[in-house]
Amino acid sequence: MIMRLRSRGISSNAVLRAVELAPRRHFVPMDKRKLAYDAVNIPIACGQTLPPPMTSALMVQLLDVQPDQKVLTTGLGTGYLAALLSHMTTRIYTVERYKTLIREADARFKLLGIHNVVTRHGDGRYGWPGQAPFDRIILGYALRAEPETLLEQLAPGGKLLAVIDGTLTLFEKPRTKVATTDLMPLDLDMVEAGKSRTL
């Protein structure tokens, strides 16, 4: 998979190393493991999907995470995106609305010896105010409008990456004003309001 990612534009050695250290097969349901490295969305628990490997690698590369930065991910899913980021910086904070996904991801992190991901049950659209500000924020789901609450939790000099209305969008905050760049069309699961009490 490393050669395939390189051929498609993943040039960051930090990202490629993270891909090697977080074997994707561990983040795919057992009955779907034959699809782990295919360019398809894989159904996971709670009606969600895991994006293709290229999507995750590209988003992490565009986020440009540095080793000493504080990172927030919203929409934990199987934990794959957080696992990649865990090998690139010292601490990852993540918010997920489904308790089932949190339990399963935490078990994967333990199995793989990943100890720097902190998970929280909640509505990711509101971020994690008690831990803000963050140097980098990445959304594992799509939105229809700009994530104003999350942008408020972005530190000066920070970057936020999200899919807005079908377009992968980079938000950069040099000081206080946010600059927006539309990057490319991208399809992710659309966010659902609230947090799950049963799943």
Image (cartoon, rainbow, N blue to C red):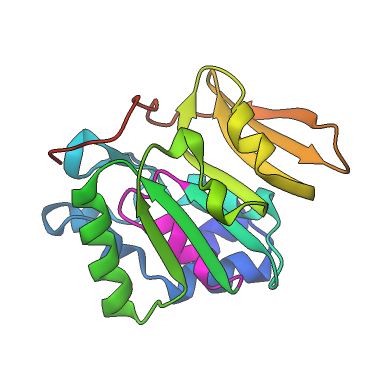
Q: Which quadrant would the C terminus be assigned to in this image?
A: top left
Tell me, yes or no, if residue 139 can be seen here: yes
Q: Quadrant of residue 33?
A: bottom left
Q: Position of residue 61 (x, y in %)?
A: 64, 54
Q: Is residue 81 magenta?
A: yes
Q: Quadrant of residue 104?
A: bottom left
Q: Is 64 placed left or right of 29 in the picture? A: right
Q: At 59% from the left edge and 74% from the top edge, which residue is drawn?
A: 90
Q: Is residue 109 magenta?
A: no
Q: At 65% from the left edge and 43% from the top edge, which residue is drawn?
A: 153
Q: Quadrant of residue 196?
A: top left
Relative vertical location of residue 47 with respect to residue 143 in this rendering, above or below: below
Q: Residue furthest front?
A: 130
Q: Position of residue 68 (x, y in %)?
A: 70, 72
Q: At 51% from the left edge and 58% from the top edge, which residue is drawn?
A: 4
Relative vertical location of residue 34 with respect to residue 142 in this rendering, above or below: below
In front here: 37 or 161?
161
In front here: 108 or 121?
121
* The residue stretch that appears in magenta: 74-89
Q: Residue furthest bottom?
A: 113
Tell me, yes or no, if residue 1 can be seen here: no
